[in-house]
Amino acid sequence: MCLLKFINEESANIAEIYSIFTHRGGSGKTSLVTNLASILAHKYKKKILIIDADPKGNISMAFDKIPENFEDTIYDVMVRGIDPKEVIVSLHQNIDLIPSNGDMDFLEFDIFPRLKVYSRPYHLLKDNMRSIKNKYDYVFIDTPSSSILTIANCLIYSDKVIIPFVPDIFDVAGFSQVTKTIKEIQNTHNPKLKISGILAMKVEKATNIHKEILKEAQIFFSQSNIQLYETRIPKTILFAKSVSYNKSPAILTSKAKNKLVNSYDNLANEFLLKDKITRKKFDYKTDILELYKKKEENKQKNKVENTHKRMTFLIRKELKKRLDIISKNKHGFKTFILNQAIEEILDKTERNDD
Ligand SMILES: Nc1ncnc2c1ncn2[C@@H]1O[C@H](COP(=O)(O)OP(=O)(O)O)[C@@H](O)[C@H]1O
Ligand SMILES: [Mg+2]
């Protein structure tokens, strides 16, 4: 009985491990990791571990830390077998990091000539992470764009992959290489590895080429049985601004709702839903009913909001018309009072609208 309880408690808390991976640099991998981790930790109170596997150490920089100041990093976990608990640093409430820095540039040089010592070179991460998984809800790995040894280690340790995709011609061309790498890992070392989905990044809604590429991509991906996330992350300067000026990912610094916060809110919802569906412990009957209920509630809420907006618009239009008539109607105290009242209502409806 006791053992059963223990097993249940342990398995309830085993993190799902996601690699954010594509071969192309600058496609938003690091921004995706930092912002998705931030919204899941901040809004949904999930416990997150980020593993930075990129020698550039950009995750630390996004949280205002200098990568070269870390004495021990992911390199020491993989090469020296240091306990990951000794390397972990806290970035924010509910977000921990295993940092990376330039040491990772030497991984291949240090491992490949010593295969007698490192007999499982592609399992260095998996073998050395030990029991970290049951301390977190999610582990996100920020992968480097090159270094096949590091990429293989990340994908072998992962349950799922999210592939950031900028809808331009370079990403389309490079995409087959990405799926080839994933298939290779699935065939040789990690048959359970799943593609969670492709996520369109830096999308310019008004640009025709983006629209066309995304439409084509959707068809292509679905033929290959790969899902494209419905959420699209828009191109906005807020990402870079936030890291440069506020020393923190945009999600943690944006106070107001804007298109960036909205897109990550949608992404977090979609991510959690997808994650739940693809986890073994998903209770289809109750969870699907719950989701359906939520969708209906949202629909109803949108309907009410739209009606309210429409009514406000009509009232304002009507009031403006009357105001015009009154102002043409020369002076008089009554006109003045009426005028003021209408101005006040207009002012109020405008504020309600914002
Ligand atoms: N949605 C976005 N809109 C505009 N710029 C973005 C967006 N996402 C990321 N960027 C910027 O693009 C650059 C590369 O992003 P980054 O996350 O570092 O990519 P990667 O990790 O794949 O190299 C950074 O300067 C970042 O601020
Ligand atoms: Mg990066």
Image: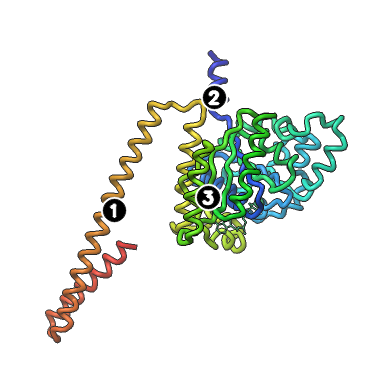
Q: Is residue 205 visible?
A: yes
Cβ atoms under marks 1 and 3 closer than 8 Å: no
Cα separation, mark 2 vs mark 1, equals 42 Å
The C terminus sits in image quarter: bottom left
Cβ atoms under marks 2 and 3 closer than 8 Å: no
Judge by depth and name the residue closer to the eye, 175 or 340. Answer: 175
Estimate the x, y position of residue 201 in percent, counting from the top left: 54, 52
Q: Amino acid at mark 3?
A: Ala
Disc 3 target residue: 200
Q: Is residue 96 visible?
A: no
Q: Amino acid at mark 2?
A: Glu
- Residue at 67% across, 45% down: 143
- Residue 104 sits above or below residue 203 on the image: above
Q: Amino acid at mark 1?
A: Glu
Cα separation, mark 1 vs mark 3, equals 29 Å
Cα separation, mark 2 vs mark 3, equals 36 Å
Judge by depth and name the residue closer to the eye, 19 or 173. Answer: 173
Q: Quarter of the image holding residue 327?
A: bottom left
Disc on the earlier residue, 2 or 1 = 2
The answer to whether residue 322 is left or right of residue 97 is: left
Disc 1 target residue: 305
Estimate the x, y position of residue 346 in percent, counting from the top left: 25, 69
- Residue at 16% across, 74% down: 322
Q: Residues within 10 Å of mark 3 (few under 14, many from 20)?
A: many
- Residue at 62% across, 32% down: 133
- Residue 28 sits above or below residue 148 on the image: below
Assign a secondary structure to mark 1.
helix
Disc 2 target residue: 9
